[in-house]
Image (spheres, rainbow, N blue to C red):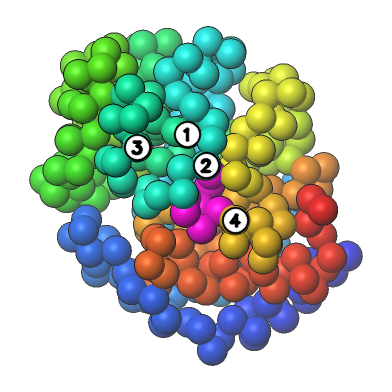
Amino acid sequence: MDYQAVLAEVWDAVRPVLGQGRVATYIPALAAVDPRRFGMALATVEGDVYGIGDWREPFSIQSISKVFTLALALSRDGDALWRRVGKEPSGNPFNSLVQLEYEQGIPRNPFINAGALVITDRLQRLTGDSRGTLRDFLRAESGNPLVDFDPVIAASEAEHGHRNRALAHFMASYGNMESAVPEVLEHYFWQCSLAMSCADLAKACGFLARHGQRADGSRLLTRSQAKQVNAVMLTCGTYDAAGEFAYRVGLPGKSGVGGGIIAVIPNRCGLCVWSPGLDARGNSVAGVEALDRFTTLTGLSIF
Ligand code: GLN
């Protein structure tokens, strides 16, 4: 398949929606980005990389980081991890508090903020350095030693992160936080601040297309665990829009409020698209449109 030609066609098709949606403003440092930016990259399991637009431009990965912390924690903790967090779609916004009380402090899934905070807490306990473990993993998988945190974004979120603070303390009241809440929040804000390009992320999610095998041929996840992470991405990766994302795109995917979305085609490739204009559920408008066009044009989806 001529992926470069397909990406060019996708880019043409999404031009009318570029600039639609609104950039995230609840983290003030994210509000400065131009909503019309657009990039997309595809990295095959064989190691070829294709891209269009701003595909080499680093952006704030935000909640896309939750896929990698989940995979890193699951690889070390195995099924015990699921005692701390569920795997059901929430049907609620990513930063919602409402279900936590009914669920006795156990978040519905690892991709809403509450669940991601639990995973960060667990990864910190399992590794002693969740941030460093995550950054080193992403550098290795993307092949880019310059992948790093953005301290301005991390500080901006820390200053305005009242909801995440509320979520973490609420879970702590149910005994579902092992470390001190401020420490967990700090690790979480830093993980969300990582700056990566579409090329970096398309390569970095390759282990999910290779059924758990890392770029160097070693194994992070068992085949079954890679299936589990992909399944949770499909059902929970775009929050209360996961049904529509599965319907339109038909791939496991994970969005972030920086405007990025990664998607996985098992056996074939990792994809990443970036455009900062978000819809009401916090997913990139042009990003979802581009992935929809991509799977429609190519016929490639998991269905
Ligand atoms: N850091 C953001 C937050 O916690 C991540 C949210 C997102 O990307 N959906 O609010």
Mark 4, residue position: 243
Residue at disc 4, CB closer than 8 Å to ligand 1: no
Secondary structure at badge 3 equals helix
Task: Identify which residue is drawn at 74% across, 23% down.
Answer: 224
Which residue, as the protein is rendered here, is positioned at the far right? 1
Sequence-first disc among 4 and 1: 1
Mark 3, residue position: 99
- Whether residue 288 is visible: yes
Asked if the residue under mark 3 is in contact with the one under mark 2, i.e. CB atoms within 8 Å, the reply is: no
Q: Which of 179 and 85 is in front in this view?
A: 85
Asked if the residue under mark 3 is in contact with the one under mark 1, i.e. CB atoms within 8 Å, the reply is: no
- What amino acid type should be assigned to the residue bearing mark 2? Pro
Secondary structure at badge 1 equals loop
Q: Nearer the viewer, mark 1 or mark 3?
A: 3
Secondary structure at badge 2 equals loop
Q: In this picture, is 216 found above or below 98? A: above
Mark 2, residue position: 89
- What amino acid type should be assigned to the residue bearing mark 1? Asn
Residue 33 position, x and y percent, is 31, 70
- What amino acid type should be assigned to the residue bearing mark 4? Gly
Mark 1, residue position: 109
Task: Specify the label residue 238 is tagged with.
Answer: none
Quarter of the rendering containing residue 292 = bottom right
What residue range appears in magenta?
Answer: 236-242
Sequence-first disc among 4 and 3: 3
Asked if the residue under mark 2 is in contact with the one under mark 1, i.e. CB atoms within 8 Å, the reply is: yes
Sequence-first disc among 2 and 3: 2
- Whether residue 183 is visible: no
Sequence-first disc among 1 and 2: 2
Task: Identify which residue is drawn at 37% across, 57% down.
Answer: 257
